[in-house]
Amino acid sequence: MMLKLQKRLAADVMGCSPKRVVFDPSKLEDIKEAITKTDIRLLIGDGTISMLPKKGVSRGRANKIKLQKRRGLRRSAGSRKGKASARTPRKQAWVKKIRALRAFIAELREKELISPEDCKRVYMMAGGGFFRSIQHIKIFLTERDMWLKQKKVAVAEAQPSSDGKVQNRKTKTKEN
């Protein structure tokens, strides 16, 4: 029995694919006589023609992954796509770094650990992108002997002795 027309009309009325249209096998004669959309609507109302539910892809696995990501998991190197600058833009990384460096330089000046001239020089170098990190600034200051407190301690260590000669505490000479 050819019910191609009825299947197409039913699909149009229900707004679905003809593949999802199902006919009641016991009432095929009634379906065969239906040749207009109005007839098809009556049969749909009776339950003679019905529609299969949509088949879809389950969201269960996707929801589980979303929950894990919300908890902070799935962030290791194998899960990353794109460059590091895609996850944290270069500008944000720069702003974060330069704020830390400038705060450290301001702290050094406030505690008078470096001179204002050296502070200005280091500040400008930081703005120019010379320093990688706070540790790099410390290494730079140490290599160039810019620490004021260390200089004061070194001056205090080199005290004059009773005979007027300057002696270093660490290398005291034995007096005979």
Image (cartoon, rainbow, N blue to C red):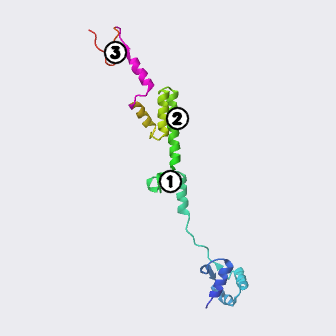
Under tag 1, what secondary structure?
A: helix
Q: Residue 86 bears which disc, if any?
A: 1
Q: Residue at x 52, y 32 (%)?
A: 106
> Would you place residue 89 above or below residue 109 in this image?
below
Q: Residue at x 40, y 19 (%)?
A: 155
> Would you place residue 107 above or below residue 130 in this image?
above
Q: Amino acid at mark 1?
A: Ala
Report the span colored magenta: 143-162
Q: Label 2 vs label 3: CA separation?
A: 39 Å
Under tag 2, what secondary structure?
A: helix
> Would you place residue 45 above or below residue 98 in this image?
below
Residue highlighted by disc 2:
103
| Label 3, residues with CA under 10 Å away: few <14, some 14-19, many ≥20 | some
| Label 2, residues with CA under 10 Å away: few <14, some 14-19, many ≥20 | few
Q: Amino acid at mark 3?
A: Gln
Q: Are marks 2 and 3 in contact (CB under 8 Å)?
A: no
Name the side, left or right, on which 114 lies relative to 11.
Answer: left
Between residues 154 and 68, which one lies in front from this camera angle? Answer: 154
Give coordinates of residue 80: x percent, y percent. 47, 55
Between residues 13 and 132, which one lies in front from this camera angle? Answer: 132
Quadrant of image for the N terminus: bottom right
Quadrant of image for the C terminus: top left
Give coordinates of residue 78: x percent, y percent. 44, 56
